[in-house]
Amino acid sequence: KTFAKHVGHVLLAYIDSMNDPLCILTPEIRRELEPGLFSLCEMLGEHNREALMVSALDSGGMTLMKSFWREYEKQ
């Protein structure tokens, strides 16, 4: 429960790194990270995801977050 308040920051760091042209995460690395990141999405919930998108992400980050969330919902 205590970690839950930090989940948004962890996901934000991931989205920021994916949005950074100097940071390269290969598809293999992303696949390895997905189970843990999807667990974070479950902890975050939709309401907090929306708040994160509005308050902390630029348009590129929002696009990445929406795409990532769709992948989370598929699994």
Image (tube, grey):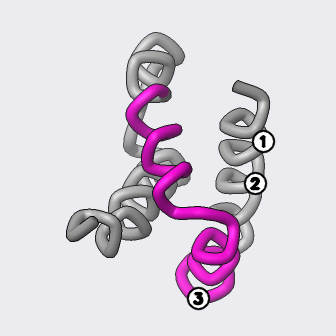
Kindly state the secondary structure of the residue where label 3 is placed: helix
The quarter of the rendered structure image containing the C terminus is top right
Q: In the displayed structure, would residue 16 be above or below residue 74?
A: below
Kindly state the secondary structure of the residue where label 2 is placed: helix
Give the spatial CA distance, label 2 vs label 3.
15 Å
Residue drawn 67% across the image and 43% down it: 68
Q: In the displayed structure, would residue 40 be above or below residue 46?
A: above
Q: Is residue 58 visible?
A: no
Dot 1 corresponds to which residue? 70
Left or right: where 53 falls relative to 32: right
Q: Amino acid at mark 1?
A: Arg
Q: Amino acid at mark 3?
A: Ser
Q: Nearer the viewer, residue 20 or 63?
A: 63
User: Which is nearer the N-term, disc 3 or disc 1?
Assistant: 3
Do callouts 1 and 2 mark residues in contact (Cβ within 8 Å)?
yes
Q: Confirm whether the magenta stretch covers residue 57.
A: yes
Position of residue 53 measured from the top left corner of the image (x, y, whole percent): 65, 75
Single out the mark in the foreground, 3 or 1.
1
Mark 1 is surrounded, within 10 Å at the Cα level, by few (under 14), some (14 to 19) or many (20 or more) other residues, namely few
Dot 3 corresponds to which residue? 55
Q: Amino acid at mark 2?
A: Lys
User: Which is nearer the N-term, disc 2 or disc 3?
Assistant: 3
Residue 49 numbered tag? none
Residue drawn 46% across the image and 11% down it: 28
Residue numbers of the magenta segment = 35-58
Left or right: where 55 falls relative to 29: right
The quarter of the rendered structure image containing the N terminus is bottom left
Give the spatial CA distance, label 3 vs label 1.
20 Å
Left or right: where 26 falls relative to 48: left
Residue 66 numbered tag? 2
Q: In the displayed structure, would residue 39 be above or below residue 5?
A: above
